[in-house]
Image: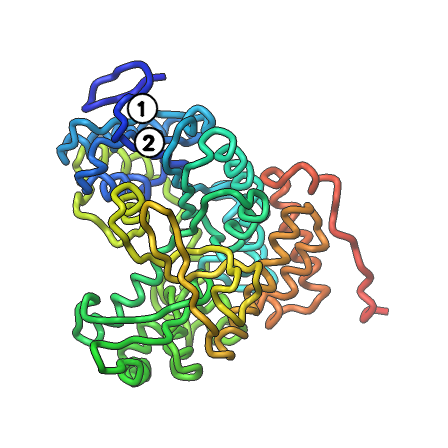
Amino acid sequence: MIIVLAGKQIYGNQNTDARMKKIVIIGAGSLVFSSRLTADLLSYPLLADSHFALVDIDPERLEYAGQIVSKICEQGPYPHASYSLHQDRTTALVDADFVISSILVGGYQAIQAEIDIPKKYGVCQAIGDTLTPGGIMRCLRTLPVQAALARDILKLCPDALLLNYTNPMAMLCWGMSEACPELKLVGLCHSVQGTTEQWAERLGLSIDEVQFRCAGINHQAWITEFSAGPNDLLPDLRRLAQTPEIWRHDTSRMEYIKHFGYPVTEASGHNSEYSPWFRKNAAMVNRYCPGGSWNGAPGFIKELYNRPDWRKTMRKMASWETPISLQRSIEYGSQIIHAVTSNQPEIIYGNVPNRGLIDNLPEDACVEVACQVDDKGIQPIPFGPLPEHLAAINRNQINVQRLAVLASQQADPELVFQAMCLDPLTASILTLDEIRSMTRELLEAHLDVLPEEFKHRRLAEKPLLYRL
């Protein structure tokens, strides 16, 4: 194996320094995410000599990823950091302390199918990676890979903590936790910190001046308290939500506050997909999802992943023509790894099995709550009950998540259909016959990236009785 230390190739066991942490990044060939996390981690002096085992199945992207990490180490400067390149994750996982997963199974072709096929039936998605037909199909093709990764971790580095950034977050964390209950796992997103900082800024405050409580599920967690000292700021948020300027730039989220009383995490584009209220037809999309991606531009995810210029982009990063900021970002990943390594506690928001954390959500669901992190690992903090109407909205998603996970575990097309039927957006637009037809077409389009069992278990045909 070739290890690179301070830009020079060396050979041997990279884990010779007892203080050095081995961090495995699965999906290291991403355009931005892998380099961002690497720079974040190295910004901590305690982690500045870390070894990064970079994993990607695409050898060209992997080579660029190595060049980018080398340049970060050079510019840092972090002369004692090192990295190695792996197309086979099992060679990277041996003796790992932390594993970070951010993968895409099926590539652009799968994304194109799961956006365009539902659109043909009238189901207009913006992102489609969390719920909706796109999120369900992404679960089917990704959960088997993630579950296999979880089993490899328990075999090769059983004490390692897995930080999952791959979507659909709740479905994948739910499925991995069931496949490997002993796995040390947390699912991470930036929507809680992004949303709370945004609201603080709208109020003219620093996030450091604000105290808040938040809980729910990934991409649909609820800010139930927001204050500065003794001052309750929720009335101010509710007032701002009805101002035309803010409403126009963040429409569906502001509609949630207007009608339900509490801010929800994640941007309006995502939020518009998880309900039956904003995307039933073109006129509604134009009204509630105007403008760019954050507000829910139709098919935005295809634009995001259709990047014929990726080589040029990565080449510029590797040459530092497009430099990577060495300032730490708001991503939780580096904070968690530093807290575990240093025993300096942090509070983060993570996706974990419920197990009594939120009283009025199902016990087996994957929920997003505050967690304390230190050398004991991830310690979720019980929240109690959500306002009942907010929990009910969450449960609409959880029903779909549960069926999608079961569909993946059992490779059962009928369960896939049932998950599609319960999806709030799909159910608001299509009949059961139409959903069955759409599901069959989606499964056919994804056969090459689904488990082998789906090739032998086709979704049953049903008669269209209204024609008789």
Q: Is residue 122 at all visible to an observer of this figure?
A: no
Q: Quadrant of residue 213?
A: bottom left
Q: Quadrant of residue 324?
A: top left
Q: Residue 449: x percent and y percent?
A: 58, 39
Q: What residue type is labelled 2?
A: Lys
Label annotation for residue 22: 2
Indicate whether 171 appears above or below 220.
above
Other residues around mark 2 within 10 Å, as few (<14) / some (14–19) / many (≥20): many
Which residue is at 45% across, 58% downward? 127
Quick one: quadrant of the N terminus? top left
Q: What residue type is labelled 1?
A: Asn
Q: Along the horizontal axis of the image, is 208 left or right of 37?
A: left
Label annotation for residue 15: 1
Indicate whether 349 appears above or below 22.
below
| Pick the front one: 376 or 96 | 376
Which residue is at 24% across, 44% downward? 40
SS category of the residue bearing label 1: loop
Q: Is residue 107 at all visible to an observer of this figure?
A: yes
Q: Residue 52: x percent and y percent?
A: 31, 31
Q: Residue 249: x percent and y percent?
A: 31, 72
Other residues around mark 1 within 10 Å, as few (<14) / some (14–19) / many (≥20): some
Q: Are marks 2 and 1 in contact (CB under 8 Å)?
A: yes
